[in-house]
Image (spheres, rainbow, N blue to C red):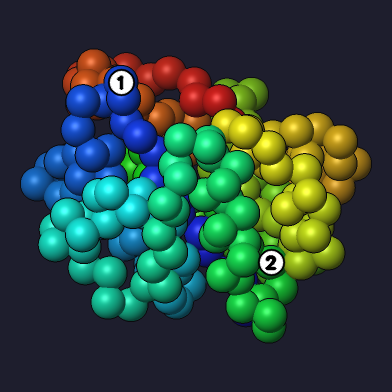
Amino acid sequence: MIDAIVLAAGLATRMGEIKPLATIEGEPALSRILRRIREAGIGRPIVVLNAGSAQTIAGAVDLAECTVVENDSPEVGLSRSLRLGLNAVSAEAAGVLVFHADMPFIEAGTVRAVLRVAEGGASIAAPVCSGRRGFPVFFGKSHLPGLRRSLSGDAGGRAYIETHREDLETIPVDDSGCVYDIDRPEDLAAWEGGLACATNA
């Protein structure tokens, strides 16, 4: 069994709205990501929400089949959300796939590709599109304690991956959605216009 964490507690200061609720083809961004996770066969994802917007998000997104964790100090940075998510990972899980709520264009095939590599024995895995490492990123169970200890400020798992590159298995994909985030309204408009940019994967 592999768990999934969706980090959705950002302050969205540049977006001007609650990013997980940004509408894409009539659907909230968070709903799109949860659908991709379900399509990959992963049950009960862990969703980390900003405590200040959790009620609003729950009113717009079906979270009934999710484990919801509220981050009451999102200003601490990404590290706190990821740590809270890791704390909710099942003891039986062989590892975890990490998603970001501001990356709603990831294709189901990419999620399945990373999952296959993880189930095949990789201890860290990530998709790569046009030379850029993207999401979701898989961390095997053996790496979770070290990942927790490495977390600080607004950094996620990037620094940890850099110190464990020998364990990283990359999966080439033709999916610019795995390296594209929507920090600003113009990012969403750019994607809808067929453009692409790299996120801090």
Mark 2 vs mark 1, foreground winner is: 1
Residue placed most toward the observer, 99 or 125: 99
Q: Residue at x 53, y 37 (%)?
A: 76
Tell me the crowding category of disc 1: few under 14, some 14 to 19, or many 20 or more residues within 10 angstroms, Cα based. few
User: Which quadrant of the rendered structure holds the C terminus?
Assistant: top right
Q: Residue at x 55, y 60 (%)?
A: 85
Up-down: is 143 above or below 170?
below
Relative image position of residue 181 (x, y in whole percent): 40, 30
Circles 2 and 1 in contact, beta carbons < 8 Å: no
Residue placed most toward the observer, 27 or 173: 27
Which amino acid type is shown beneath numbered disc 1? Arg
Residue where numbered disc 2 is placed: 95
Left or right of 118 on screen, residue 65 = left
Residue 155 visible within the image: yes
Which amino acid type is shown beneath numbered disc 2? Gly
Q: Residue at x 64, y 24 (%)?
A: 131
Residue 103 visible within the image: no
Relative image position of residue 24 (x, y in whole percent): 17, 40
Residue where numbered disc 1 is placed: 14
